Image: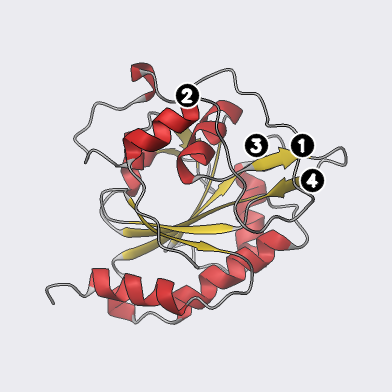
Amino acid sequence: MKTYITLFGLVLFLAAAGYLAFAENTTEKEPQEKPKKESSCCSSEHMGTDSFTENSLYQLNSKWKNQFNNDVELKDLKGKINVISMIFANCSYACPILVNDMRKIESALSKDELRNVQFTLISIDPERDTPKRLKQFAEDQNLNLARWKLLTGSRSDIDDFAVLLGFRYKKENDGSYSHSNIITLLDEEGEIIHQHVGLNEDVTETISLIKEKVNKGV
C-alpha cells in the first residue's frame, strides 16, 4: 500500500502526453500497447466552472447515470470522503474482490463516521453496464444504496476519469477487461489523498486515514 498526493496539474500533463502506467496488480497480462484516446481531459471544455480546489478531480466536466438511471455530475459527489474504484459488472474475479475490500472499509466505520463517507463504483464497460445492470450488481453484492453510487457514462468520460485516477484498463477479445486494482480515497473536495493497490490486501491504513479525516475537529 502506498499513499499518493497527486497534483491535478501533473496528472493532466501526463494525460496530455499520453502517459499511462499500470498499477502494481492487474487481472490479466500487462498489455503491450497503450490504448489510444482521441480526446484529452486537459482542455478547458472538459473542466467545470464551479468552485473547486486546484487539485480536485470534480473539476472534470462529465455526465453520468447512476443505478437509478438518474443524471449525476462529479460535482454532486462533493462534501464527503469518497471511497472509489473502477469496475465492470461482468467481472468474475478481481472486481468482486475490490468491492469486498471496500465493504471491509465500510464495516470498520461507525454509523457516525459513515454519515461523512460515500462509496462509488464507476463502470469501465458502458456498453453492458446499464443503470439496470449496475443496480442488479449492487443487489448481488448486498450494497447499501444509501451509501453506494454506481455510475456509468460515455467511453470518453470514463477514459478521462481513469487517467486522473492513474487507472489502466484494456478490453480483451472475449469482452472482459484487464485492469488496475486500485481503491482511491478522495477528500471532501475531490482531491486524491490515498490509493490502496492490490486485492485482498490489508486495508487498515485506508480505514485509519478515513477515520482521521472524518473525526478531525470532533
The one of 35 and 13 positioned closer to us in this rendering: 13
Q: CA distance from mark 1 to mark 3?
A: 24 Å
Q: Position of residue 218 (x, y in %)?
A: 13, 77
Above or below, 154 relative to 74: above
Q: CA distance from mark 3 to mark 2?
A: 23 Å
Residue at screen point 68% across, 65% down:
96
* Badge 1 or badge 3: first in the primary sequence: 1
Label 2 belongs to which residue? 16
Amino acid type of the residue that numbered disc 3 sits on in the rendered structure: Pro
Above or below, 28 relative to 174: below
Label 1 belongs to which residue? 32
Label 4 belongs to which residue? 176
Residue at screen point 62% across, 47% down:
22
In this rendering, the label closer to the viewer, 3 or 2: 2
Above or below, 167 relative to 183: above
Label 3 belongs to which residue? 126
* Badge 3 or badge 4: first in the primary sequence: 3
Q: CA distance from mark 1 to mark 2?
A: 20 Å
Amino acid type of the residue that numbered disc 1 sits on in the rendered structure: Gln
Label 4: few (<14), some (14–19) or many (≥20) C-alpha neighbours in 10 Å: some
Label 2: few (<14), some (14–19) or many (≥20) C-alpha neighbours in 10 Å: some
